[in-house]
């Protein structure tokens, strides 16, 4: 190797040496920078939950539409079902008679009570007796002034007149008790009627005419207006939802594919489930025409106010 070539080789080696990092921590700094870039990207993509969870993330969450109330309707008293008026899927109104127990004895008892309460013979008899006693007392007091009768006779007649007056008062009290007995007989008969306590639809019919009922239910009725929307939300979003907040509901059933329903938050559970780190939220979905189905899954998007 001549002198010119040796000088060129030394210059190249010194240049490569000058390009090496001067400290051993250069690799660590490069990895930290790369990790920061990846973390920001993951956060923007929604892969890493932010401590400030936004309402925009609360979309396409699974939910369930359920009846707002479900009642297992029974009888106030045991007995044999004489008539059953409704079946499954029938719509009923609050107060509608769903079924009736055998009640011949109760109807006869009511008829007797009404007859006793409407009778005025006993009252008329007491009034006539009291009137006669009062007139007798007045005549004897006049005779006492002329010494026509003794004081003993006058005292006896006055006492009898007073007794007759008290008998009239007692008859009035008996008449009032007879009227109350009518009300009791009517209440007893009414307990043989099974009425719906809500507006809704018959979900299940457990008993039919001719069957005996005691403590078991006869019907199951579901209230369909309004409906409840139940959704489970991760605890990291606690505080982002509030009562009255509006949400958009979509259901994948025939006839509702392109419809967006509106529901409002009614209740937010105060106690979360520690095992799943979630808490429940209930929304109210108005259903005045009873067309929205219940017992179906749905998707929910919470809307920022």
Image: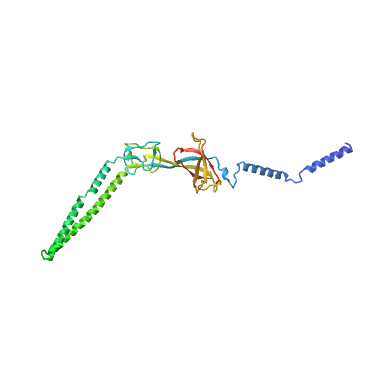
Residue at the extreme right:
3
- Residue at the spot x=32%, y=40% of the render? 100
The answer to whether 103 appears left or right of 196 in the picture is left
- Residue at the spot x=13%, y=66% of the render? 145
Quarter location, residue 28: top right
- Give the image location of residue 249, x and y in percent: 51, 40
- Is residue 276 visible in this depiction of the protein? no
The answer to whether 133 appears left or right of 219 in the picture is left
Residue at the extreme left:
148
- Is residue 219 visible in this depiction of the protein? yes
Q: Nearer the viewer, residue 212 or 106?
A: 106
Q: Nearer the viewer, residue 37 or 223?
A: 223
- Give the image location of residue 284, x and y in percent: 47, 44
Residue at the extreme top:
254
Q: Nearer the viewer, residue 244 or 27?
A: 244
- Residue at the spot x=73%, y=45% of the render? 26
195 above or below 175?
above
- Give the image location of residue 85, x and y in percent: 34, 37
- Residue at the spot x=27%, y=43% of the render? 107
């Amino acid at each position: 190797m001549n002198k010119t070539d040796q000088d060129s080789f030394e210059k190249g080696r010194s240049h490569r040496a000058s390009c090496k990092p001067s400290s051993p921590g250069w690799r660590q700094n490069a990895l930290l920078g790369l990790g920061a870039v990846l973390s920001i990207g993951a956060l923007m993509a929604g892969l890493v939950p932010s401590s400030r969870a936004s309402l925009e993330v609360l979309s396409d969450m699974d939910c369930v539409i359920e009846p707002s109330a479900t009642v297992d309707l029974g009888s106030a008293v045991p007995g044999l079902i004489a008539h059953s008026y409704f079946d499954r899927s029938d719509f009923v109104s609050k107060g509608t008679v769903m079924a009736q127990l055998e009640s011949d004895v109760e109807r006869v008892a009511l008829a007797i009570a009404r007859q006793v309460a409407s009778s005025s013979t006993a009252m008329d008899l007491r009034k006539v007796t009291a009137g006669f006693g009062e007139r007798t007392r007045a005549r004897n007091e006049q005779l006492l002034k002329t010494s026509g009768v003794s004081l003993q006779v006058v005292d006896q007649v006055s006492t009898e007149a007073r007794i007759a007056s008290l008998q009239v008062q007692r008859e009035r009290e008996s008449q009032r008790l007879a009227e109350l007995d009518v009300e009791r007989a009517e209440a007893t008969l009414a307990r043989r009627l099974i009425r719906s306590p809500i507006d809704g639809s018959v979900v299940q019919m457990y008993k039919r005419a001719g069957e005996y009922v005691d403590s078991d239910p006869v019907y199951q009725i579901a209230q369909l207006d309004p409906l409840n929307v139940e959704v489970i939300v991760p605890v990291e979003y606690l505080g982002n939802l509030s009562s009255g907040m509006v949400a958009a509901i979509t259901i994948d059933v025939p006839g509702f594919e392109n419809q967006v329903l509106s529901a409002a938050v009614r209740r937010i559970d105060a106690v979360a489930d520690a095992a799943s780190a979630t808490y429940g939220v209930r929304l109210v979905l108005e259903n005045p025409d009873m067309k929205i189905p219940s017992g179906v899954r749905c998707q929910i998007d919470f809307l920022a106010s």
